């Protein structure tokens, strides 16, 4: 579904990605793990069209998208949940969701049906639909950010640090929701510092270090990799 090939990207004179390549197949959850500054968010910015690469290409369903506008990329079927949630605090839950469906704003029936799907996935949002986004708890805001991204009915959902700033119980609920979204047929690319949680729900993973992919493989293989265990899981290497 998604193929990133040899991508290099920079912020002015500072290079952030060095020949990065990865792929996501239909129906997968793929995670991208790494420490702060490794280039994870930059990778998502390239995919969504927010940052144009200086070299390389990005294909979505076999079509190059590197020169397309962000709105076109959303129409093709890619949506993103940004780092820090970024809900509109002075707008209601319902209004936040309506913004997520902006590309189909003239199709009232489509919007209504999609919103009902979101409410069935996140019942708390229906209970809070007239409440201002800024008054929600951190976990509820994350549910709203996920719901808003799903309002465009994406084929591929990108998630940038969904566990950031959440209490442990809300981290678990968020990852339960992510798995629920996947079960309903959405493909996911998950960027996450919480490597253990990410690898627990993912099919495959990539490890990003200073703008380069240094490891990739099945989630199980990465969970058992000594380098990953020591650097990202806080565990020692395997004995024996």
Image (cartoon, rainbow, N blue to C red):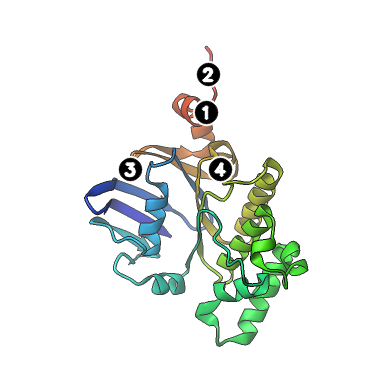
Q: Nearer the viewer, mark 4 or mark 1?
A: 4
Tell me the residue that label 4 is attached to.
Answer: 198
Tell me the residue that label 2 is attached to.
Answer: 238
Badges 4 and 3: C-beta atoms under 8 Å apart?
A: no
* 3 or 2: tag closer to the N-terminus: 3
> Which disc is residue 224 wearing?
1
Q: Nearer the viewer, mark 3 or mark 1?
A: 3
Which residue shows up at 66% across the image and 72% down it? Answer: 92
Please determine whether, in this image, residue 154 is positioned above or below residue 28.
Answer: below
Badges 2 and 1: C-beta atoms under 8 Å apart?
A: yes
Q: CA distance from mark 2 to mark 1?
A: 8 Å
Please identify the quadrant where the N terminus is shown.
bottom left
* 2 or 4: tag closer to the N-terminus: 4
* Neighbour tally class for label 3: few under 14, some 14-19, many 20 plus, Cα within 10 Å: many
Helix, strand or loop at label 4? It is helix
* Neighbour tally class for label 4: few under 14, some 14-19, many 20 plus, Cα within 10 Å: many
* 4 or 3: tag closer to the N-terminus: 4
Which residue shows up at 47% across the image and 69% down it? Answer: 77
């Amino acid at each position: 579904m998604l193929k990133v090939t040899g991508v290099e990207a920079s912020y002015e004179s500072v290079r952030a990605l060095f020949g990065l390549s990865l792929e996501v197949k239909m129906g997968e959850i793929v995670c991208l793990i790494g420490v702060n500054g490794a280039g994870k968010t930059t990778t998502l910015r390239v995919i969504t069209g927010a940052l144009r690469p200086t070299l390389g290409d990005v294909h979505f369903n076999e079509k190059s998208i590197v020169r397309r506008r962000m709105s076109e990329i959303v129409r093709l079927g890619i949506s993103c949940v940004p780092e820090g949630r970024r809900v509109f605090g002075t707008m209601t839950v319902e209004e936040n969701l309506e913004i997520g469906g902006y590309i189909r704003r003239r199709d009232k029936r489509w919007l209504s049906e999609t919103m009902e799907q979101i409410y069935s996935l996140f019942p708390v949002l229906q209970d809070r639909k007239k409440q201002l986004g800024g008054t929600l708890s951190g976990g509820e805001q994350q549910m709203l950010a996920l719901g808003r991204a799903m309002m465009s009915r994406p084929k591929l959902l990108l998630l940038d640090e969904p566990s950031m700033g959440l209490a442990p119980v809300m981290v678990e609920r968020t990852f339960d929701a992510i798995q629920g979204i996947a079960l309903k047929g959405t493909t996911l690319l998950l960027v996450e510092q919480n490597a253990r949680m990410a690898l627990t729900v993912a099919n495959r993973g990539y490890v990003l270090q200073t703008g380069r992919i240094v490891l990739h493989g099945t989630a199980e293989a990465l969970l058992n990799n000594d380098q990953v265990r020591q650097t990202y899981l806080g565990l020692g290497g395997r004995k024996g």
